[in-house]
Image (cartoon, rainbow, N blue to C red):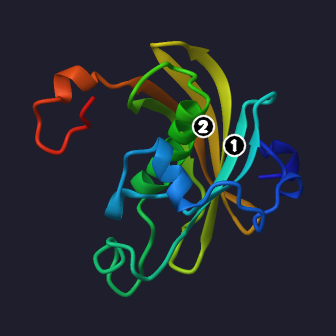
Amino acid sequence: MAPRDYIIHPSEYDLERVIADIDEIRRWNRQRFEMEQLTAIVHEDQARGLCVGYKDVTRDEFWVRGHFPAMPLMPGVLMCEAAAQLSSYYTQKHNLLDAQVIGFGGMEDVRFREPVVPGDRLVIAVERIRVRPKAMIVCRFQGLVRDSVVVDGTIKGVPLPVDMLAGIPGAPQG
């Protein structure tokens, strides 16, 4: 994919300038342990509706042993989860949906273009396309490894019914 097709060109952000570490990400996202798919946030631009973060993919990931033995490839669903978590972080931090918790609402036009393996830094960019407060956010996303687009698509986030989930063990409370 040519640089003109980037959501945000890599020259516009600095991967060494962390603006939100894992503790700050946890303020806004509820995923923990194996389900945390972000390492840091490095860029936000509210005027353009952009956010950039990354996931350092290590040999200690829960999927390495089995996906696939002797040839570990990051599952595509986890690349999408990383994009969803970045979108959720941005949405929650800026209160775009006025919701306690945001969940997957859908995905469209997702393409996996190159493999992601342990040792890679998966850089994710999300761009807000539209927001319907209390209903849905739609974002375009891209994942890059060394300036090559490895995954892209459109993701939708929706408020989760926290009150309905309250009685479920492990569900968010109030």
User: Residue 102's x, y, as percent?
Assistant: 41, 31
Residue 44 vs 79, above or below: the answer is above
Q: Is residue 167 left or right of residue 68?
A: left
Q: Which mark is residue 90?
A: 2
Q: Amino acid at mark 1?
A: Cys
Query: Taking 80 as reference, is 48 left or right?
Result: right
Give the farthest residue toward the front. Answer: 174
Quadrant housing residue 172 = top left
- Taking 14 as reference, is 6 above or below it? above
Identify the residue at horizontal 80%, vertical 30% (top origin): 48
Q: CA distance from mark 1 to mark 2?
A: 7 Å
Q: Which mark is residue 51?
A: 1
Instruction: Check whether the beta carbons of the residues at disc 1 and disc 2 lie within 8 A of each other.
Output: yes
- Mark 1, other Cα within 10 Å: few <14 / some 14–19 / many ≥20: many
Give above or below for 34 relative to 28: below
The image shows residue 32 at horizontal and vertical percentages of: 35, 57
Q: Nearer the viewer, residue 37 or 117?
A: 37
Residue type indicated by callout 2: Tyr
